[in-house]
Image (cartoon, grey):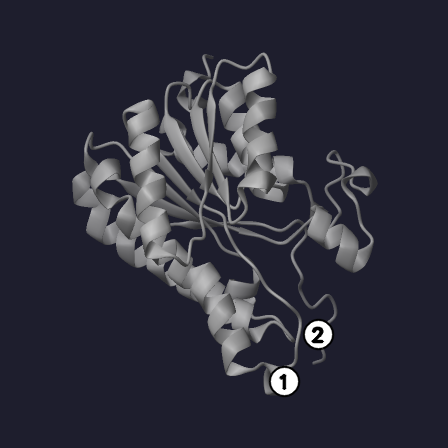
Amino acid sequence: MPLDQFSVAGKTVIITGSSSGIGRVVAERFAEDGANVVVCSREHANVAPVAEEIEASDGPGHALAVECDVTDREAVAALVTATVEEFGSLDVLVNNAGASFMAGFDDISSNGWQKIVDINLAGTYHCTQSASEALKRDSGGAVINIASVAGQQGSPYMSHYGAAKAGVINLTRSLAFEWAGSGVRVNCVAPGFVATEGLESQMGISANDVERESVERRVGLSEEIADVVQFLASPASSYVVGETITAAGVPDIMESPDM
């Protein structure tokens, strides 16, 4: 059976927060499949090497590095403009930029709360609204928001992050309804623990410790999240609209409930 429906070849894709981790792997995966990718982060020095490596690879896709703070509306608008000028269109937006820190609710300052909400939720708003015209132009665009299981079930000591990601999940469903008539599909991925550089620094778990073949685990790989993102960006997910796909391994359930 042909698998062309899973391809993103020929598409132009913006991936925010793509200097490392999930965002970088998504960019590399898409370019390898033939997409033109725009990689961005707050520091050009962090994201330029990603674009350079993609350009130097054997993959058919091309890459453009753009410095962009997703909380800065003017910078986001410039990102979209640079994308269309370079590649002529915008087909897919992956809202991956995010940030957090651990703290008890009583210890989160108003500035700390606002910063996390600005990056995770307002950043998604800025990028999606700024890309609206370009995504709707050819009636076939897709938005993939990266949320978190923290936004689905809560997360002690990360209440600010969980609240922001819950907002992203709700925004996904609301916007999917509004934009469906324009031919743009909006969906979301809610990862659990993923073996990124950040997780390794916090918990000491690296990608080398994770066996993809193992079903019984609670830590995944960036490549596994990229698989889901590619599915949502491809024609294979044409009937998936407004959904949040959870990728978090074995469910956390009560195995022997008290009666």
Asked if residue 215 shows in the view, the reply is: yes
Asked if residue 242 shows in the view, the reply is: no
Front residue of 157 and 77: 77
Left or right, 188 with respect to 88, comes to: right
Structural crowding at the residue carrying mark 2, measured as other residues with C-alpha within 10 Å and reported as few (<14), some (14–19) or many (≥20):
few
How far across and down, in percent of the image, does residue 157 sit?
65, 75
Location of mark 2 (residue): 257
Kind of residue sitting beneath label 2 = Pro
Residue 159's disc number: none
Cα–Cα gap, marks 1 and 2 = 33 Å
The C terminus is located in which quarter? bottom right
At 34% across and 59% down in the image, what residue appears?
A: 171
Image: 6 above or below 107: above
Left or right, 98 with respect to 216, comes to: left
How far across and down, in percent of the image, does residue 108 sit?
59, 81
Kind of residue sitting beneath label 1 = Asp
How far across and down, in percent of the image, does residue 243 sit?
39, 50
Label 1 SS: helix
At 69% across and 46% down in the image, what residue appears?
A: 196
Left or right, 152 with respect to 205, comes to: left
Location of mark 1 (residue): 107
At 78% across and 37% down in the image, what residue appears?
A: 211
Left or right, 133 with respect to 76, comes to: left
